[in-house]
Image (cartoon, rainbow, N blue to C red):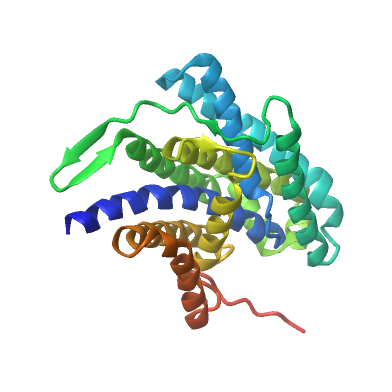
Amino acid sequence: MAMFLQQLINGISLGSIYALIALGYTMVYGIVMLINFAHGDILMVGAYTGYFLLSILGVSPVSLAIAFLASFVVCGVLGVLIERFAYRPLRNAPRLNSLITAIAISLILQNGARVLPFVGPNPRQFPRPAVNTMVIGWISISNIQIIVIVLSAILMFILNYIINYTKRGKAMRAVSYDMQAASLMGISVNGTISFTFALGSILAAAGGILFACAYPQISPTMGTMPGLKAFVAAVLGGIGSVPGAMLGGFILGIAETLTKGFISSQYADAISFAILIIILSVKPTGILGKKIRVKV
């Protein structure tokens, strides 16, 4: 039982990161029906932004807050630029064109970071806060895990508030439901889509710094596997569903840590993808996904 509770805490911490990244996937897909495979590399940009600032300012609560804010700005602007110059010209093109473009943007970000002299291809140690562990009964929880869980919960709450209770969130829901009708009602479709990309990129930036704090080694390819796992989480919960992305992230994180704790770390990835296959075999739209009728 002690081992189970400990792995459950670890899984909630890891699942919080997956959920943050998965939210970016599911929001973009819900708006423009695009799988943004460059999303994991935006996570990498956020992690490197935090790395450079923390290396200069030192590790403290104030510098950590500054690193988060700076990574939000950098990744938010990057997301808007990618949408404006890479995806918007292909909005009315076949979906395969946008998918290939997303893969190309991912490769450009990875290899562009590798050739930059101040980044380079070699892994770097991320300057995270000192790890302090607190024992509560049978389980131990570190200050890093507390930061990850609490900050992820705050960001998810803010996102839920923006989507459901703000004018911009209502515009996002209208555009996702019917882009042409929303345009006729006076909603700026391009502005709403750019805002969605910025919001998703900000969540990826937060996920990047939190992932680097939990696993303090960064590299230009660090976003590949978390991005893929977050995509799996988004599909598992129901692509296009914000609560589904959160649920899928937590399920994937808990399943991964329980596998590492009770079976073997070598099977963690395989079991995570097996869960996706099983869920989609039973419910093809994901756990919280809805069936969509297409008129012909």
In the rendering, at what x and y percent does residue 64 appear?
Answer: 47, 24
Image quadrant in which you'd find residue 72: top right
Residue 9 shows up from this direction? yes
- Vertical position of residue 270 compared to residue 292: above or below: above
The residue most toward the left is 137
Q: Identify the residue at image location x=43%, y=61%.
A: 266
Q: Please give left or right for residue 206 compared with residue 121 in the image.
A: left
Of the 4 image quadrants, the one containing the C terminus is bottom right
In the rendering, at what x and y percent does residue 197 appear?
Answer: 67, 46
Q: Please give left or right for residue 241 compared with residue 196 in the image.
A: left
- Vertical position of residue 57 compared to residue 12: above or below: above
In the rendering, at what x and y percent does residue 237 appear?
Answer: 49, 65
Q: Please give left or right for residue 118 compared with residue 229 in the image.
A: right
The residue most toward the bottom is 296
Q: Identify the residue at image location x=48%, y=19%.
A: 63
Q: Please give left or right for residue 142 compared with residue 114 in the image.
A: left
Q: Identify the residue at image location x=86%, y=63%.
A: 93
Q: How many marks?
A: 0
| Residue in the foreground of this view, choosing between 116 and 209 | 116
